[in-house]
Image: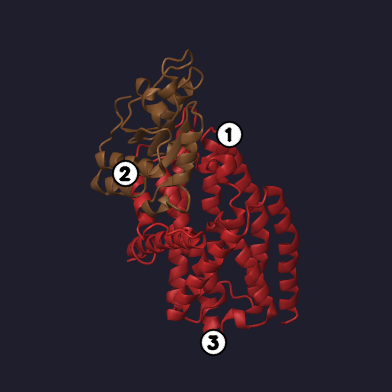
Amino acid sequence: MYVGLVVVFPGFVFTAFIGLLSSWFDRKLSARLQWRVGPPWYQGFADVAKLLGKETVLPQGSSRMTFLGAPYVGFAAVIVVATIVWMASIRPDSGFVGDLIVVLYLLYVPSLALIVGGSASRNPFAALGASREMKLMLAYEVSFLLAVFTLLVKNGGIVSLGGMVAYQQAGGAMLSQGISCIIAFIVTLIYVPAKLAMGPFDIPEAECELIAGPYTEYSGAPLAVFKLTKAMLLCVLPVLVITLFATTAWSPWAILWYVLFLVVLVLIKNTNPRLRIDQALRFFWGPVLVLSVVGIVLATLGL
Amino acid sequence: MEDNKKPLSKLSRWGLKKSPWAFHLNTGSCNNCDIEILDALTPKYDLERFGIILIGSPRHADVLLVTGIVTMQTMPRVLNVYEQIARPCLVVAVGACACSGGIFDGSYHMVGPIDKIIPVDVYIPGCPPRPEAIIDGVVKGLAKL
């Protein structure tokens, strides 16, 4: 039964399906914003199907184990995160104590896998992309953790996702519980595009400077796995945010929330030019950090 | 270099036809064909409808768009890029120069045309070819795969 939960629903197959559809939604909406027609709905599936069939080239002098293994490590972590988050939001009693902490840790892993894979591929562009990814990670994680901490202060220290859902079912969505939660939500809204390396924060894979960043040397199945990981993150992160902030239960309203969240992400992406890595660091360690600290202070004051 | 056509499963072949990623390589052209390739990617023609996007890394490429006569300087780089591409891939010669040498045929610095260096699947003549012709050529080439 647990295998089914992880592999089919709500783990791998379901999340990958929603994620690839979401990545199409991203591309389609971006196209419409640029007065284009955009790709058909199966575009994400076609990309992955093609990459799975293509040759995998191993660059000369790269570390074989690390280069080929890294994508799968990140992939496995996202599958586990997807399973935990979906299960907690569908059946709040099925979680375990502290699963939020596990989720937060596992969300590091795809970024780490990208850093390791990029560094192992013996390509200056990939190495530069990996180093930028690392700096970006150092930038956004603190603010996001403080935003989550605000919620913990607010709900009296419930660290399980299921518990947080149950808490919101009893007392209303987190977003409606005061200004500190709204601040935490804004910080999270800034964190999500940085985590996904999209929008103004696509610094690691800046295609006009770094070719494809850490992905540069990847081809064939490992690249497909990376694309799939990214698509699944595009599904998991909004679901996590909705679970943390706005869920009272998974209903048609939650699906509306999800689509709305994606629309906001795509709008941010299409209306903001890419930041330099130093600008991004300054942005996250300056205004965003101050905002999240203000959120925590307000939460301790009970606002 | 004859392993250009790697056998593909049905699913992957469908994927390849629905999402051909193009890599653009200039081997010493006058930039006219290159501008037409960029024209084909503008919102007016909107190649993303067919899943075609321009990518920066030859490792991700399915379609190699070559423009220009191959000059002595670019020849080793052409070979280098061609060898970096993950198979299967489609090589498309864009423009009169890439097809036959065009007005530069017989020049002292010319090694090409491109089919002397690497196997070419599709020839798109024209100086420069219209974006419609480039799209048509790539589509016909994909049907061959």
- Which residue is tagged 1? A124
Q: Nearer the viewer, mark 3 or mark 1?
A: 1
Q: Which corner quadrant holds the C terminus of chain B?
A: top left
Q: Which corner quadrant holds the N terminus of chain B?
A: top left
- Residue A170: image tag: 3
- Which residue is tagged 2? B139
Residue shown at the point (67%, 54%) measured from the top left: A139
Q: Chain of mark 3?
A: A
Query: Are there few (<14), some (14-19), or many (20+) residues within 10 Å of tag 2?
Result: some
Q: Position of residue A43 (x, y in %)?
A: 37, 55
Asked if A106 appears above or below B57 in the picture, the reply is: below
Real-space CA distance between mark 2 and mark 1, rounded to the nearest whole angstrom: 34 Å
Of residue A223 and residue B81, the one placed in the foreground of this image is B81
Q: Amino acid at mark 2?
A: Val
Q: Position of residue B115 (x, y in %)?
A: 35, 24
Q: Amino acid at mark 3?
A: Ala
Q: Position of residue B143 (x, y in %)?
A: 26, 42
The chain coloured red carries which letter? A
Asked which colour scheme the image uses, the reply is by chain
- Chain B colour as displayed: brown
Q: Chain of mark 2?
A: B
**Residues indicated by labels 2 and 1 sit on the same polypeptide chain:** no
**Farthest-out residue, top:** B108
Real-space CA distance between mark 2 and mark 3, rounded to the nearest whole angstrom: 58 Å
Snapshot quadrant of residue B40: top left
Snapshot quadrant of residue A3: bottom left
Element type at mark 3: helix
